[in-house]
Image (cartoon, rainbow, N blue to C red):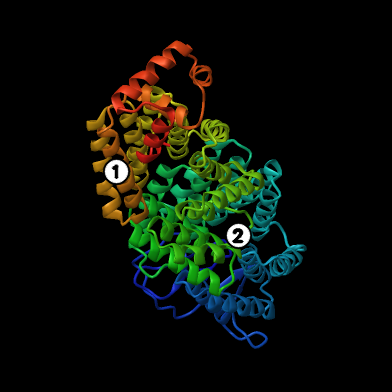
């Protein structure tokens, strides 16, 4: 008769509906369990009934609970776990009862159900207060660490997770060690120690992909690591661990490892890679799952769905999804402002993004806000405001030192330099951004950057280069179904054709634009840092080339050819 020890792990055996208490899956074992015994406190309890329940009953319920959770039946799994807890209490098995209480409380904590979490965790702590040192006490340090991370006390959180890790190592409980490692990693990242933090996350994921932990722990750790990668814009690490976990999942076909925020992060990665149809399916699944269970992750899920609808030009669906996201999200995000910009409501877009920028201060979220801020305020001509936002985004990019946020930052700086007329520097920044987006396999973002590069090339009078950039961008937008960008591209190409028939040089166009604003020769000279005599010569050339004789006619030409 095999004995089950409190420190053993619950794992799903491949091609089996039974979860066995073993540290590592063993395909040689089948799903038949003829007898069961427990060892607790040095005493073996046989499978006879005690107080109306048996150890077999309790452990089978706990195993069934784990299996239900693993295949995505969360409500059923939690109900079985609560029944297992009561069964363990009825037969005097305190440690297994406390472990069930811990998991009920821990999962309630992650779901945002604070009162239930407090109740179950307090019960687990009370049950263990008279027990000798045991691994179950180590698990109770995990929610303490998460609470401290939420309170932004990273140092104390790291210490709490460290105590859990030490107990896990003492009792050789790989689940506890791995959960504690990822907790310490997240705590360090929140303190700004990104390199040390991701090293611990990597160590935790090595344990996951090596099959050292139970599938339930594997899914939870992966979701946490993927979420952390999103916070620090480390797309490459997220991709690497996603690929590794998918290989692991291939051997565990019944397991549903993607829960919580990681479902949304996966949709975001799919969108970035241009797999928009698959991303929409993932986002819709997340919306349905989280809204039905009233989980806070619903906000991020609806926001991701709204973003996908927006870039596809499905504005009504995007509006609905953004509003649904707003019911759940605690932190405002820039999507609705970008929607207003796409709808041509520039003033509303500006007001919205300025309000959001005042509220959002956390660096990861703020980076996304600042990227949108630059795009929106440039559309209304606020170059100074765009410059300030681009500079702040540049500082955040230097802090994270990740290709994703660096690509965002260099594109923003390039767009501002373009608006300021510093074309050579603008082209250098935009080319760097485009290379980074290509390295990240982000076709849509790379194509958007190409359009800006085309704008620079057009101003530098390199029409062939501008046309090539636009052609390449058009191919990507057409393949993805990015209808708003296709429309903007058509408008841009129209302006380019106008400029092809325009005999003016780049400097003459610049001066013509200032004439159209009503500036005098002196005002233009001051603005451009040149002499009034040079301005007068340029204006004379403009009049001759356009066969006009007045500033009013020059202004009319500028408006007719969409130069202002």
Residue 206 picture location, percent across and down: 44, 47
Image vertical order of residue 99 relative to residue 386, above or below: below
At x 29%, y 42%, the residue is: 493
Residue 393 picture location, percent across and down: 54, 35
Q: Which residue is mark 1?
A: 494
Q: Which residue is mark 2?
A: 329
Dot 2 lies on which element?
loop
Q: Nearer the viewer, mark 2 or mark 1?
A: 1
Q: Residues within 10 Å of mark 1 (few under 14, many from 20)?
A: some
Residue furthest to the bottom? 52
State yes or no: discs 2 and 1 in contact (Cβ < 8 Å).
Answer: no
Q: Residue 277 sits in which quadrant?
A: bottom left
Q: Nearer the viewer, residue 324 or 106?
A: 324
At x 43%, y 54%, the residue is: 268
Q: In the displayed structure, does residue 461 sit left or right of residue 186?
A: left
At x 68%, y 81%, the residue is: 90
Q: Residues within 10 Å of mark 2 (few under 14, many from 20)?
A: some
Number of dots carrying numbers: 2
Q: In the displayed structure, does residue 144 sit left or right of residue 229?
A: right
The quadrant in which the C terminus is found is top left
Q: Residue 465 sits in which quadrant?
A: top left
Which numbered disc covers residue 442? none
Residue 551 picture location, percent across and down: 43, 28
| Disc nearer the start of the sequence (2/1) | 2
Q: Nearer the viewer, residue 213 or 219?
A: 219
At x 68%, y 48%, the residue is: 160
Image vertical order of residue 262 relative to residue 117, above or below: above
Separation (CA) of disc 2 from disc 1:
40 Å
Residue 361 picture location, percent across and down: 64, 43
Dot 1 lies on which element?
helix
Residue 562 in sight from this viewpoint? yes
Residue 213 in sight from this viewpoint? no
């Amino acid at each position: 008769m095999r004995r089950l020890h409190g420190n053993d792990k619950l794992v799903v055996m491949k091609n089996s509906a039974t979860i066995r208490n073993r540290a590592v899956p063993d395909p040689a074992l089948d799903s038949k369990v003829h007898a069961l015994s427990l060892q607790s406190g040095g005493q073996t309890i046989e499978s006879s009934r005690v107080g109306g329940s048996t150890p077999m009953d309790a452990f089978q319920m706990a195993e069934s609970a784990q299996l239900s959770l693993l295949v995505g039946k969360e409500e059923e799994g939690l109900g079985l776990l609560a029944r297992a807890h009561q069964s363990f209490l009825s037969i005097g098995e305190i440690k297994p009862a406390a472990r069930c209480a811990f998991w009920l409380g821990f999962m309630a904590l992650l779901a945002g159900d604070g009162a239930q979490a407090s109740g179950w965790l307090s019960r687990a702590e009370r049950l263990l207060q008279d027990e000798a040192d045991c691994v179950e006490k180590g698990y109770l340090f995990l929610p303490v660490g998460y609470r401290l991370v939420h309170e932004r006390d990273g140092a104390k959180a790291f210490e709490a997770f460290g105590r859990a890790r030490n107990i896990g190592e003492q009792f050789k409980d790989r689940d506890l060690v791995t959960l504690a490692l990822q907790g310490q990693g997240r705590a360090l990242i929140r303190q700004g120690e990104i390199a040390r933090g991701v090293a611990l996350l990597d160590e935790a994921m090595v344990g996951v992909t090596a099959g050292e932990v139970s599938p339930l722990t594997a899914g939870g750790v992966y979701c946490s690591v993927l979420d952390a990668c999103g916070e620090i814009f480390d797309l490459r690490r997220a991709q690497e661990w996603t690929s590794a976990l998918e290989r692991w999942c291939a051997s565990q076909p019944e397991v549903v490892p993607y829960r919580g925020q990681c479902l949304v992060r996966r949709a975001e990665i799919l969108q970035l890679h241009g797999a928009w149809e698959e991303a929409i399916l993932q986002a819709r699944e997340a919306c349905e799952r989280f809204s039905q269970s009233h989980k806070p992750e619903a906000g991020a899920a609806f926001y991701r769905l709204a973003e996908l609808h927006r870039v596809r030009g499905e504005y009504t669906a995007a509006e609905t999804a953004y509003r649904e996201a707003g019911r759940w999200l605690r932190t405002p995000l820039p999507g609705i402002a970008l929607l207003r910009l796409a709808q041509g409501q520039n003033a509303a877009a500006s007001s919205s993004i300025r309000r959001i920028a005042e509220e959002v201060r956390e660096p990861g979220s703020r980076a996304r806000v600042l990227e949108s801020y630059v795009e929106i305020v440039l559309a209304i001509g606020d170059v100074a405001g765009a410059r300030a936002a681009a500079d702040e985004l540049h500082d955040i990019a230097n802090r994270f030192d990740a290709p994703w946020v660096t690509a965002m930052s260099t594109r923003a700086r390039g767009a501002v330099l373009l608006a300021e007329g510093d074309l050579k520097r603008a082209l250098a920044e935009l080319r760097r951004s485009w290379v980074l987006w290509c390295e990240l396999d982000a076709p849509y973002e790379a194509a958007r950057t190409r359009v800006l590069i085309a704008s620079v090339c057009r101003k530098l009078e390199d029409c062939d280069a501008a046309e090539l950039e636009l052609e390449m961008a058009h191919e990507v937008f057409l393949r993805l179904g990015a209808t708003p960008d296709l429309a903007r591209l058509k408008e841009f190409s129209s302006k380019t054709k106008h400029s092809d028939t325009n005999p003016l040089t780049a400097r003459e166009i610049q001066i013509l634009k200032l004439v159209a604003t009503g500036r005098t020769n002196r005002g233009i000279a001051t603005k451009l840092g040149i002499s009034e005599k040079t301005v007068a010569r340029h204006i004379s050339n403009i009049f001759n080339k356009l066969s006009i004789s007045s500033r009013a006619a020059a202004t009319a030409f500028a408006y007719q050819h969409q130069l202002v």
